[in-house]
Amino acid sequence: MALQASSLPTTTLSLHKEGKLSARAKDSAFWGVSIPDQNKSPFYFAKAKKLSTAFAVKSQTAATTTTTTTGAAPGESKSAAEGKKVLRKGVVIVTGASSGLGLATAKALAETGRWHVVMACRDFLKAETAARAAGMARGSYTVVHLDLASLDSIRQFVDSFRRMGMPLDVLVCNAAIYRPTARQPTFTADGYEMSVGVNHLGHFLLARLLLEDLNKSDYPSRRLIILGSITGNTNTLAGNVPPKAGLGDLRGLAAGLSGQGASVGSAMIDGGQFDGAKAYKDSKVCNMLTMQEFHRRYHEETGITFASLYPGCIATTGLFREHIPLFRLLFPPFQKFVTKGFVSEEESGKRLAQVVSDPSLTKSGVYWSWNKDSASFENQLSKEASDPEKARKVWELSEKLVGLA
Ligand SMILES: NC(=O)c1ccc[n+]([C@@H]2O[C@H](COP(=O)([O-])OP(=O)(O)OC[C@H]3O[C@@H](n4cnc5c(N)ncnc54)[C@H](OP(=O)(O)O)[C@@H]3O)[C@@H](O)[C@H]2O)c1
């Protein structure tokens, strides 16, 4: 692709070449980009006059009119010189695409042949292995390192992505961690409580930086999607399972989520005692508030669609990896046979892929959910998760914490 091999760290290249994909590398300084064989790649960087940011697909002229659940009509531009249609794949960044929902979504989109998926992951080798194991075709994806627990890594990712020369049509903020059994907070590289730091603050910075790129795209429908959750919505049964989400007066966020005690602030957004499960739920409230604040600030001006969603209870994913073994054993059958809220990873991937690409899901400011027949509908957020004043305050405080204000 556009990134030259010479600009990659030697370690990345040699590991990749040797195909030692079972190794795990979690060093945040370790980043990489998979480099598909140029000759086999379906892409070319068009120098056509009309396609300033072109990322065109030569072989897809026949696919213009077909749409599927997961694959919408691709971007389409006209070359003035030749007067014929030049089509290109949509380019979507999916954070946390190395497992669970992110991987299933990446696969669903790549399989349509109409999307190139940039898998933004903290563990390059895990992501590459997962993509291959899922059967994703070489050239349908690019793995780029992103550690959302480091503001430097996020800025580096944006830099790397821009140097690749691809347009950006859709950004999916999907990655998350959930630490329900943690007794003590852990912290990001910048000193913020980990769940809110990764799930909210990291994505907040990423989305703010990449808004410019989305705005430049010539794709017909540009979207910014931030994963929400039923657990952050106290207007639901699941959202009422203790500990409930609650941002309070945001005093902990204002003090920097440092967890250094009363004088310098708590690790929790509301300033309360650390609770790992609540920290996750609070981060999801921030995700849903952020999506709406993006909508209020930028939808009219840019035409970008901002959306959030609850994909269903995907009880088998790595999200529950830190839960006690008995919970991990019983949770999937409980969801399947008791609540009947269970959704497979494959089905959830199709749902998120719909929000990425379905021509009927272009409404902005919406929190999507699916009924038992897997039909999408606009869901209601809780009072707190739809409070515009709180959204504005979370936005402004977050700007300070990520160095944008
Ligand atoms: N599972 C559910 O029932 C459910 C329900 C509602 C909403 N959701 C939402 O769906 C999304 C995906 O969750 P999932 O269930 O698919 O969980 P998952 O399988 O654990 O996937 C989470 C992804 O986030 C990545 N990640 C974690 N920390 C990161 C960091 N610091 N930097 C970059 N990436 C990081 C993980 O990377 P590694 O592979 O390296 O660990 C993984 O790829 C989350 O936003 C979650 O809140 C899930």
Image: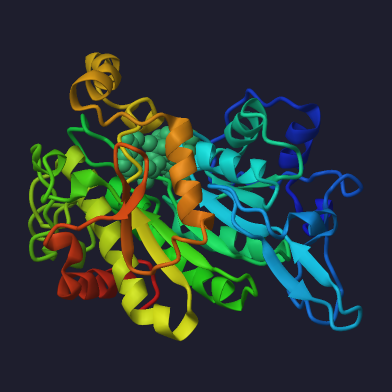
Residue located 35% across and 43% down the image: 311
Measured from the top left, where is residue 236 in percent x and y?
A: 13, 45
For the rendered model, the colour scheme is rainbow
- Quarter of image, ligand 1: top left
Q: How many marks?
A: 0
Position of residue 325 relative to residue 310, above or below, is: above
Position of residue 124 relative to residue 271, above or below, is: above
The reply to whether residue 265 is visible in this rendering is yes
Residue located 14% across and 57% down the image: 382
Screen quadrant of the N terminus: bottom right
Q: Is residue 138 left or right of residue 201?
A: right
Along the line of sight, which residue is nearer the eye, 19 or 241?
A: 241
Screen quadrant of the C terminus: bottom left
Snapshot quadrant of residue 308: bottom left
Along the line of sight, which residue is nearer the eye, 50 or 72?
A: 72
Measured from the top left, where is residue 352 in percent x and y?
A: 45, 47
Residue located 8% across and 60% down the image: 248
Residue located 19% across and 27% down the image: 339
Along the line of sight, which residue is nearer the eye, 153 or 295?
A: 295
Measured from the top left, where is residue 171 in percent x and y?
A: 51, 60
Q: Is residue 250 left or right of residue 378?
A: left
Along the line of sight, which residue is nearer the eye, 28 or 169?
A: 169
Measured from the top left, where is residue 298 in percent x and y?
A: 40, 80
The reply to whether residue 1 is visible in this rendering is no
Q: Is residue 142 left or right of residue 243?
A: right
